Amino acid sequence: MMTHEEMVAKMLEDPEVKAACDALEPEFELFDELLRARREAGLTQEQVAERMGTKPPAIARIEAGGGSKGHSPSVATLRKYAEAVGCELRIKLVPKRISKKRRAKSAPKEATA
């Protein structure tokens, strides 16, 4: 019987599965960041909900990626969450990583004399 880690490693050998997982990475990073901030603040979901003026299940959905409907939290909701855990929300755009092969194809051709 395979362990969970072995099963995941085997599944990630499939390029389509790997691409799908890679595409979700920014969302996973966001939800990890939310959990980290709440834990560092020493707060429960119930305490965050109270500070935000909502119910604990709403916080659970935010931290889990929107629940069964898969809705992403709005910037306003993320700002309220950040405030509730004693943080400030910052959003930044980061250039995509380009593979060496793609970079070589897209690089401008040098003129030769």
Image (tube, rainbow, N blue to C red):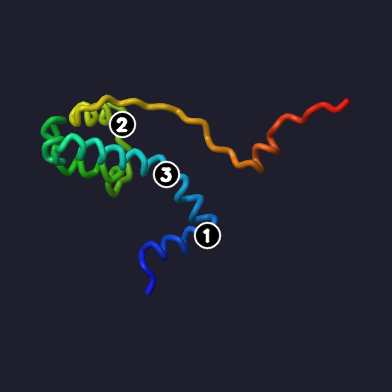
The residue at 46%/45% (across/down) is 23
Q: Position of residue 77 (x, y in %)?
A: 25, 30
Q: Answer whether labels 3 and 1 touch (C-beta < 8 Å).
A: no
Q: Quadrant of residue 36?
A: top left
Is 84 displayed left or right of 30 in the figure?
Answer: left
The single residue placed furthest to the bottom in the displayed view is 1
The residue at 41%/65% (across/down) is 7
Secondary structure state at the residue bearing disc 3: helix
In the rendering, which numbered label is found on residue 74? 2
In the rendering, which numbered label is found on residue 25? 3
Q: Position of residue 14 (x, y in %)?
A: 52, 59
Q: Answer whether labels 2 and 1 touch (C-beta < 8 Å).
A: no
In the image, what residue type sits under mark 1? Asp
Q: Position of residue 49 (x, y in %)?
A: 14, 36
C-alpha span from label 2 to label 3: 18 Å
C-alpha span from label 3 to label 1: 17 Å
Disc with the residue nearer the chain's start (2 vs 3)? 3
The residue at 45%/28% (across/down) is 93
In the image, what residue type sits under mark 3? Glu
In the image, what residue type sits under mark 2? Ser
- Mark toward the viewer: 2 or 3: 3
- Mark toward the viewer: 2 or 1: 1
The residue at 47%/64% (across/down) is 10
Q: Quadrant of residue 64?
A: top left
Q: Position of residue 32 (x, y in %)?
A: 31, 42
Name above or below for residue 27 compared with residue 90: below
In the rendering, which numbered label is found on residue 14? 1
Q: Quadrant of the N terminus?
A: bottom left
